[in-house]
Amino acid sequence: MIPQQKNRKSKFIFVYILLLIFITSINNKNFNNKELFSKNLIFEVNGLSYVDNQKLKRDLININKDNIFKLDKNELSNRINENNLVSTFLAKKDYPNKVNIQISKAKYFGKIYRNGQLYIIGSNGKLINYDADSMKDLPYFYGTFKREEFLKFSNVLNNFGLKTKNISSFYFFPSGRWDIKFKDGLLLKLPNTDLINVLSKAMLLKNNQNFSNSKIIDLRIKNRIISNG
């Protein structure tokens, strides 16, 4: 019995060694495979149109000629944010050589002339080139304002729930305040502070029969309403 057991044990050890050699050979082959630490990073972009996804991929293709472990996160972020269609994004590494990027596209908020050319203003405050069909129902913006001033104002409108589909134009003034022109012809003059409360009052007045013929509702002076029929 003892010689048989030794013989079985020897066979088991032999098979184990062969299996170990086989597995090690596969691992060594994969380790030496260029695809494991490829210098050619693959960027997968989703969230925009097919054409815009491909354009962004082309913009990123030369971001890093080394492997995924040395990917410069700041450079990647800067390149993506250079695209004016991008509102926010999430990038995840998918080893060995892929980066998946999910884009949240900026919404179209309005349109504005800059340097003689008509642009769309995105919800991110950036200017976007698009055809006239994308612009036809958007309100115009007038005045010279900074991106931060636009974002502050648009956040107020979003928090209040005011729909831009009923607005024909916005006007910005050097004092930092805005006017709103509705499609029904009403011009609403706003102060530059406490906008949510003022907008609440303004919309009540707009729907009030006593102000149904008003062309202007001026709320620039605190606790005072000036109406012009």
Image (spheres, helix red, strand yellow):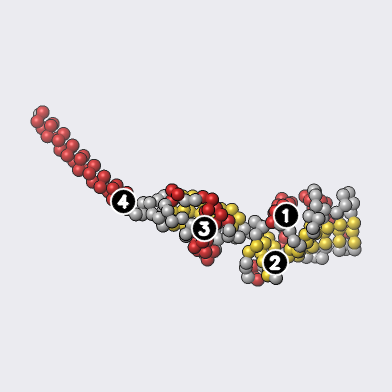
Q: Which mark is residue 32?
A: 4
Give the residue displayed 43% in from the left and 48% down from the top: 69
Give the residue displayed 89% in from the left and 54% down from the top: 225
Q: Are marks 2 and 4 in contact (CB under 8 Å)?
A: no
What SS does tag 4 mark?
helix
Q: CA distance from mark 2 to mark 4?
A: 55 Å
What SS does tag 3 mark?
strand
What SS does tag 1 mark?
helix
The residue that mark 2 highlights is 114
In the image, taking residue 45 as reference, residue 210 lies left or right, namely right
Answer whether residue 136 is visible to the viewer in this image.
Answer: no
Q: Earlier in the sequence, mark 2 or mark 3?
A: 3
Q: State which quarter of the image contains the N terminus.
A: top left
Answer whether residue 96 is visible to the viewer in this image.
Answer: yes
Q: Earlier in the sequence, mark 3 or mark 4?
A: 4
Q: Amino acid at mark 4?
A: Asn
Q: Earlier in the sequence, mark 4 or mark 1?
A: 4
Q: CA distance from mark 3 to mark 1?
A: 30 Å
Between 139 and 163, the residue placed more toward the observer is 139
Above/below status of 229 relative to 149 = below
Give neighbour class at mark 4: few <14, some 14-19, many 20+ (Cα, 10 Å).
Answer: few
Q: Nearer the viewer, mark 3 or mark 1?
A: 1
Q: Amino acid at mark 2?
A: Arg
Between 83 and 110, the residue placed more toward the observer is 83
Q: Which mark is residue 149?
A: 1
Give neighbour class at mark 2: few <14, some 14-19, many 20+ (Cα, 10 Å).
Answer: few
Q: Are marks 3 and 4 in contact (CB under 8 Å)?
A: no
Residue 165 falls in image quadrant: bottom right
Query: Where residue 68 sits: x, y (%)?
Result: 43, 51
Q: Earlier in the sequence, mark 3 or mark 1?
A: 3
Q: CA distance from mark 1 to mark 2?
A: 16 Å
